[in-house]
Structures are given as C-alpha cells and as structure tokens.
Image: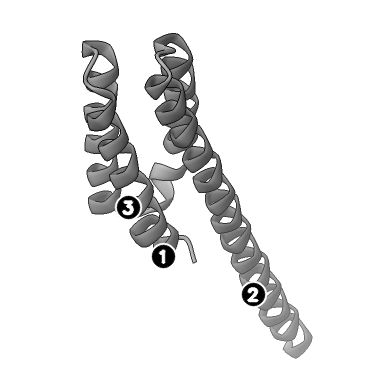
Amino acid sequence: MLAAGVVTIGLGIDGAGWSGAAVAQKKSQGRESVDRIVTSLRAVDTAYASGNATEAETRFREARAAWNSVAPRISAREAREQQLLFDSLGNQLKSGAPATKVKSTVSGMIGELHEDIERELR
C-alpha cells in the first residue's frame, strides 16, 4: 500500500516535469514564430516600398499565418491589439496606401512584437 503511494507521487512529479517541458517548448516555438513574423513584416515593407505590391501581399500572408500560430499562446488583450494592427496593414496594402503609412504600421507592429508579445513568451 505504501509503495503504491510512492509510485503515484513519483508519477505526479514526472507528469509535472513533462508539462513544464511542454510549456517551455511551446514558448520557444512562439518566439521562433515571432522571428518569422518580424522577418515577413520587414519583407512586406521592403517589397511595398519598391512598388512590388504582389510580393508585399505574399509576405503579409506569411506574417499573418505565423501570427495565427502565436496568438493562442498569449493574452487575449495583446493578441487583439496585434490583430487590429494586422487588419490595418492588410487594408493599407489592399487600398494602395502610401509607402510611408505602411512603413509606419509595420514599425509599430514590430515594436509591439518585440516589447509585449516576446515578454509574454518568456
């Protein structure tokens, strides 16, 4: 009877250890996704500024896809804020907004990703 209790406790510790490792892995994957988002957003800005709207749209879709994998891992408030920025950037690309406006939005998004989103993924 006592041995069974020890085994149960041992399994609980092992289970918690695996759970902690899984959380750490998900956060690490989230940080890697943030890096992909930033790279794609910079490519959006570069392509759009050079007049290549098609390439900018492609890079935007890549950034949004990576964002969709990060959003569930962070607080709803931070996710919503970044989602609004993605919506705004998408509208700017579709409407042919000035490159300076796109650059400003991309810069704000990258700043938000580095400051708030990465902090939540630590």
Distance between the alpha carbons at the discs numbered 3 and 2: 38 Å
Badge 3 or badge 2: first in the primary sequence: 2
Q: Does residue 21 lie above or below 48 as drawn? A: below
* Residue found farthest to the front: 50
Quarter location, residue 118: bottom left
| Front residue of this view, candidates 74 and 89 | 89
Sequence-first tag of 1 and 2: 2
Q: Amino acid at mark 3?
A: Glu
Is 27 left, or right, of 6 in this rendering? left
Alpha carbon separation for disc pair 3 and 1: 10 Å
Q: Can you say whether 63 is above or below 18 in the image?
A: above
Mark 2 is surrounded, within 10 Å at the Cα level, by few (under 14), some (14 to 19) or many (20 or more) other residues, namely few
Identify the disc placed on residue 112. 3
The image's mark for residue 12 is 2
The residue positioned farthest toward the right in the image shown: 3
**Split into 4 quadrants, where in the image is the N terminus?**
bottom right
Q: Label 1, secondary structure: give it.
A: helix
Residue 3, position in %: x, y?
78, 86
Q: Which residue is label 1 attached to?
A: 119
Give how far across and how far down residue 120 sits, in percent.
Answer: 40, 62
Outermost residue toward the top in this view: 54
Q: Nearer the viewer, mark 3 or mark 1?
A: 3
Residue at image x 29%, y 43%? 82
The amino acid at mark 2 is Gly
